[in-house]
Image: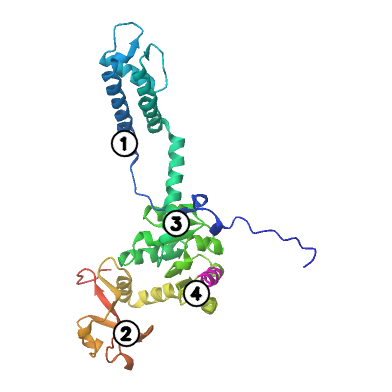
Amino acid sequence: MKGIKRFPLVNRLNDKADHELVGVLRMPEPTVSPMRAIVKRVIGAGLALLVTVLIVYFDRGGYRDADGDGLSLLGSLYYSTVSLSTTGYGDIAPVTSTARLITVLVITPLRVLFLIVLVGTTLEVLTERSRQAFKIQKWRSKVRDHVVVVGFGTKGRSAVNALLGDETVDPGHVVIVDTDQQALDAAAALGLVTVHGSATRSDVLRVAGVQHAKAVVVAPNRDDTAVLVTLTAREIAPDAHIVASVREAENVHLLKQSGANQVVVSSETAGRLLGMATSTPLVVDMVEDLLTPESGLAIAERATEPSEEGGSPRHLPDLVLGLVRDGTLYRVDAPQADAIEPGDRLLYVKKVTQVDKIER
């Protein structure tokens, strides 16, 4: 239209270079205690000082002391200390060409190393940013078939615990997208990749690699946010399996129209369990045990074995709940589940640990 001035889009995260994403996209880091870091610094500085002392002492004839009595081991230590710390009193100086060449080629680099180890906080930060940029570049070029979790609140944390509890997903293949820095810090402490930003923006989701993800878990605190995130994620990743959570059942159809494969109504599920707990509390305990993969019983999925084909899933040693065929789930009492066919998968109750009784 005439009269409307168009401006180019700026600050699109997915168009930024890898080093510009440091602080937005954070890769998991190994945990190192402060004391261990200090000890490593002291050891590094000590080694640099020791090497300098040995070099100066072995070439002590090339140095002149202000007293004129030659350079002793203590004098070599003294010269090395004031030289590496850049104090330089001038009472000891290299006088031969060899000593001066060693000072230029060896002592000066050791001086720089000494300063980096002891007082190079700024250089350490720059090094950390470069290392993060390299790790981001490597991760973005290789990440495929990972899981993106939008929102690391109560629902998001529970979803991640279930993923990691099944031991089918590596922590490095789980990406958390959130705007709360404290939540992202908690996720990073678990070894998860984190992205700081609103998942309603397509560029933030692209930084998280949604276009290459195998699954997206949408678990924000608001239903309208869940709808917008699902719509954006489906546009970027048409083949990803999207699971969304909503508080109100009346919004389920909006999530499915937006592209969610499955929708979990958190308020109704919690309310149903609360109602059951008033009359049949042990049933609720059993349901919670089935939903907790760390111990007791858990619902799992596995491929059928060739020896099981043609037989009924009801006659297997495992307690089978359903059968998945061509992406469709059939309950174990359905006619389609009478006989196992090649390529079927089974939903069954897995024994994580032997539990004879569940105590309330």
Dot 2 or dot 3, earlier in sequence: 3
On the image, the x and y values in percent for residue 166 come to 30, 67
The image quadrant that residue 292 belongs to is: bottom left
The label number, if any, that marks residue 238 in the structure image = 4
Q: Secondary structure at mark 1?
A: helix
Front residue (pair 295, 329): 329
What residue lies at 44% left-to-right and 67% top-to-bottom?
Answer: 213
Q: Name the amino acid, label 1.
A: Lys
Image quadrant holding the N terminus, namely bottom right
Label 1, label 4: how many angstroms apart (C-alpha)? 49 Å
Label 2, label 3: how many angstroms apart (C-alpha)? 35 Å
- Residue that carries the numbered disc 2 in the rendered image: 323
- Residue that carries the numbered disc 3 in the rendered image: 194
Q: Is residue 8 left or right of residue 328?
A: right
Q: Name the amino acid, label 4.
A: Pro
**Which stretch did the figure color magenta?**
226-236
